[in-house]
Amino acid sequence: MLGVSKLTSQDFFATHPVFTHGEFAESRRPGSPRTVDSLLRQHAARGRIVRVRRGLYVTVPPGANADTVTVDPYLVATKASDDATVSHHAALQFHGRAYSIWSQVTFFTRRHMRPFRFGATDFVPVKAPKAVAELPDMGGGVQLVMSGGGQVRVTSCERAMVDLLHTPALGGGWEEIWRSLEMVEFFDLEAVVSYALALGSAMTAARVGLFLEEHRDSLFVEDRHLKKLEACRPRQARYLDSSHESGRLVRRWKLIVPERVLRRAWDEVA
């Protein structure tokens, strides 16, 4: 009976621009863990691969330099753990809907991980909102998209919107959040409202409601969307975020919103 030839390391590297120790080990079976580790060390020493962090590697394409190799940062983030999902501002940036281009990629994961840096990019793991963290899909709205020679796991624009308004500290300030979200021409509003309510946060419901009401014409927002969110708003007036910046009370949402946000003062300077 003819044997099945084992995939060579070079064959594996040709189809895996970013890979984990486990993926490489699987391609070498049968083979001992010691042999796998030895092979990885040899290929790294010869400049064929670069270690990003423990258990994570980048392939150096033929003719490229190991010291300056470039790779899709969203693919690196996806491979950082088995559940890593590009999120928040980075998700909007992946979808081409971020106002500013950042050299930081945030990603959801249940794993306890430290931030790390590769090349010019900082990778920042964050926990999913507590209300959905233990769900199989961490709340849904996760897409698999081909990019950089592999599959990137990334949240939809709908989920990215709510996640940013749930944790605005990860958005780079209200101007960046507003401008980025305004670059999205269409939202599935049912998905937005459903996810916002699933988080069980009155502040998040109010912030999402405020943004949708401010953009109701361009996003075709209906009263039924706003009423669902309004029913979950805070009982008492709250500042828009933890900075407690003074502003005007928007009664419908029980939010004290800075005038610069309500007036979109950044448009006056542009």
Image (spheres, rainbow, N blue to C red):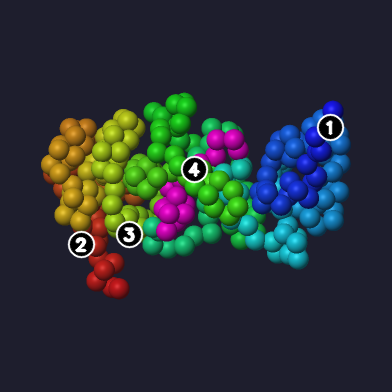
Q: How far apart are marks 4 and 3 (CA)?
A: 22 Å
Q: Distance between the residues labelled 4 and 2?
A: 37 Å
* Kind of element beneath mark 4: strand
How many circles with numbers are drawn on the protein?
4
User: Which tag, 1 or 2, sits closer to the chain's start?
Assistant: 1
What's drawn in magenta, residue-wise?
81-96
Residue 161 image offset from top left, x and y in percent: 34, 47
User: Which tag, 4 or 2, sits closer to the chain's start?
Assistant: 4
Query: Does the magenta-highlighted stretch encompass residue 88?
Result: yes
Query: Identity of the amino acid at label 2?
Result: Arg
Query: Identity of the amino acid at label 1?
Result: Leu
Q: Closer to the observer: label 4 or label 3?
A: 4
* Kind of element beneath mark 2: loop
Query: Identity of the amino acid at label 3?
Result: Met
Instruction: Look at mark 3 in the image and give the residue it sits on.
Output: 183
Task: Tell me, yes or no, if residue 201 can be seen here.
Answer: no
Left/right of residue 53 with respect to residue 217 in the rendered view: right
* Kind of element beneath mark 3: loop
User: Which tag, 1 or 4, sits closer to the chain's start?
Assistant: 1
| Quarter of the figure with residue 270 | bottom left
User: Which tag, 4 or 3, sits closer to the chain's start?
Assistant: 4
Task: Tell me, yes or no, if residue 151 can be seen here.
Answer: yes
Q: Closer to the observer: label 2 or label 3?
A: 3
Instruction: Look at mark 4 in the image and give the residue it sits on.
Output: 144
